[in-house]
Every structure is written in C-alpha cells, then in structure tokens.
Amino acid sequence: MRKGQRAVKGQKAGRKIWYSVAIFLLTAAVFTAASLMILNGVNHLKTEETKQYLDEVSVQSINTIKTRIQGELQTLEGMAVFIDGRLDREEIMHKLEEENYRNSFIRMGFVGLDYVGDIVDISGRRYTGQDVSDEDFVRQAMAGASVVSSVRPDRFGDGRIICYATPVYYGG
C-alpha cells in the first residue's frame, strides 16, 4: 500500500473514532438530560405528596387539640357542678387536689367572687390567697363563660402555660 492510501485510511479511522466519541457524548447528554427531567418530576411529585401529607396531619392535629380542649373544659365544668356552693373552701381544695391527679392539668384552683384564688399543683403544693383579678380569662369565667386563655407566662413556675376557667354557680 502506498503512503497516500495509508494516510487516507488513517484519516477515515480518525473520523470513525471522532464520530464514535461524538455519538457517545450525544447519547450521554441525552441520557443525562432525560435523567434530570425524570428526577425533577419525581422531586416535584414527592414535594406535592409531602405538602398534602403535612396538610392532613395539620388538620388531624387541630382536631385532636380541639377535642382535648373540649374534654378539659368538660372536666372543669363537671367539677364546677360538683362544687356548686355545697363545699367549704378547704373541701373544694381537697377535691381539686384529688382531681388534679386524674387529669393533665398542672394546677387547679378555685377563685372566689373577690378574685382571690387558692391553687394546688400536681405535686400537692398549694398557693393560697392569690389575687388573680388581673387575669382576663378569670374575669370572663366570672361573667359566665368557659374560657381557654392564650399562651402566657406561668406565674408559679418556669415556662409558658394555657389556662382554663369555668364559672361555678351557687345553688344552680
């Protein structure tokens, strides 16, 4: 074979290699682009599924909290009916102390018409003669409403609490 023919064959072989590399790179680019599109679609789908799941969990949590609040208010309303002016203050505190062990309240108390309250916590510690006239939820309960306060600082301990109050009617 002559020198010129070898050069042409070498050029053809070089072109074949270049075409092969170009086809490989083009195939890899198409595969990469398709993979990225699929991953993006899956990611979007998973994001939407997660949002839907979180929405459902949020609704369930809200319903659970509402049910719990209603249950806590019913506990207090039941205690209010039981108290109904038939017990003296010491008997009331004894009953509240007993009841406090059966529910999730941190403290339970009784506030008289003078807005002075006696409170007992879950450990049995009593806070007597507490002026709670500055508490809006107490004033609302004195006006006849069962009330749940906003989240507030705990005046007897660290942290924040939610207070529940219900009126006690004397003689019915």
Image (spheres, rainbow, N blue to C red):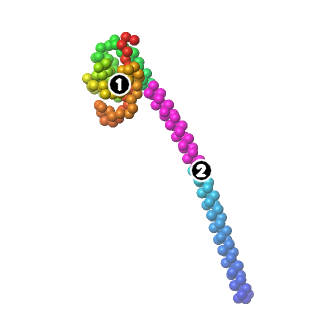
Residue 76 can be seen, yes or no: no
- Residue at left 68%, top 81%? 10
Residue 162 can be seen, yes or no: yes
- Residue located beneath label 1 in the image: 138
> Which of the 4 image quarters holds residue 127?
top left
Q: Which residue type does callout 2 highlight?
A: Val
Question: 55 above or below 18?
Answer: above
Question: 162 above or below 95?
Answer: below
Residue 92 in percent (x, y) is at 32, 17
Decide: few, some or many residues near mark 1? Use Cα within 10 Å; few <14, some 14-19, many ≥20.
Answer: many
Q: Residue furthest bottom?
A: 2
- Residue at left 66%, top 74%? 18
Residue 154 in percent (x, y) is at 32, 33
Which quadrant, please, contains the C terminus?
A: top left
Q: Tell whether label 1 touches label 2 (CB within 8 Å).
A: no
- Residue at left 39%, top 32%? 150
- Residue at left 29%, top 31%? 156
Q: Which residue type does callout 1 highlight?
A: Val
Residue 42: which numbered mark, if any?
2
Decide: few, some or many residues near mark 2? Use Cα within 10 Å; few <14, some 14-19, many ≥20.
Answer: few
Q: How far apart, in angstroms, are the residues tagged by discs 2 and 1?
A: 54 Å
Question: 148 above or below 36?
Answer: above
> Which of the 4 image quarters holds residue 152?
top left
> Which of the 4 image quarters holds residue 17?
bottom right
Q: Which residues are magenta?
A: 44-70
Residue 40: which numbered mark, if any?
none
Question: 170 above or below 37?
Answer: above
Residue 170 highlighted magenta (yes or no):
no
